[in-house]
Amino acid sequence: MAKKEAVRVFLDSNVILSGLLSDKGAPRIILDIFSLRLPFLTGVTGRYNIIEIERNLAKKMPKVIPVYREYLPKINLEIIPVPSLAEVRKFYGHISDKDIPVIVSAINGKADIFVTGDKKDFTRLKAKGSEPLKIVSPSEFIDIVFPDILKNIKGRES
């Protein structure tokens, strides 16, 4: 029997940052899930997102940077390189320019699901029929993944 591929889940900067700064809520649960290194989930984010997170932390909360640097490896995210200008160009006019490198990173990372706290920023992609992957909020992602986690736990108990 062929082994099922892990679902690739791209985490937007706001999900990572929110999860790091709060010990409650869906973003924190998501980071905790990825720290478990479950075989059926692969966490992904972009180098562009990491740069954005570090820039925001340096500007607004520099004392949090050591915690961020300690915790980031624990959530075991695959980091996708910053997309090229040629890759970014085909999305101009579909979504905000600042969001284009994020969605291209998710596509380049072969993500099945894109988790963002700013789902509305990506609705124009869906409206134009060019949504290349499933875009969900953190709480929607939890609703999607929890049945698989429970099934996996029950399977281990049998």
Image (cartoon, rainbow, N blue to C red):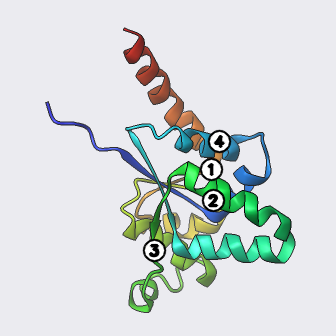
User: Which residue is denoted by mark 1 in the rendering?
Assistant: 137
Q: Are marks 4 and 1 in contact (CB under 8 Å)?
A: yes
Question: Residue at point 44% right, 37% down?
Answer: 38
3D distance between C-alphas at marks 1 and 3: 18 Å
Q: Where in the figure is residue 147, as x and y percent of width and height?
A: 49, 26
Q: Looking at the image, tell me whether mark 1 or mark 2 is earlier in sequence order.
A: 2
Judge by depth and name the residue closer to the eye, 19 or 99. 19
Q: Secondary structure at mark 4?
A: helix
User: Which residue is denoted by mark 2 in the rendering?
Assistant: 119
Residue 104, numbered label: 3
Question: Residue at point 53% right, 44% down?
Answer: 34
Question: Residue at point 53% right, 78% down?
Answer: 100
Q: Secondary structure at mark 3?
A: helix
3D distance between C-alphas at marks 3 and 2: 15 Å
Question: Residue at point 47% right, 66% down?
Answer: 79
Query: Given the image, on which type of amino acid does mark 1 rest?
Result: Ser
3D distance between C-alphas at marks 1 and 2: 6 Å
Q: Looking at the image, tell me whether mark 1 or mark 3 is earlier in sequence order.
A: 3
Can residue 118 be seen in this snapshot?
no
User: Which residue is denoted by mark 4 in the rendering?
Assistant: 139
How crowded pointer 3 is (Cα within 10 Å; few <14, some 14-19, many 20+) is rated as many
Q: Secondary structure at mark 1?
A: loop
Q: Are marks 1 and 2 in contact (CB under 8 Å)?
A: yes
How crowded pointer 4 is (Cα within 10 Å; few <14, some 14-19, many 20+) is rated as some
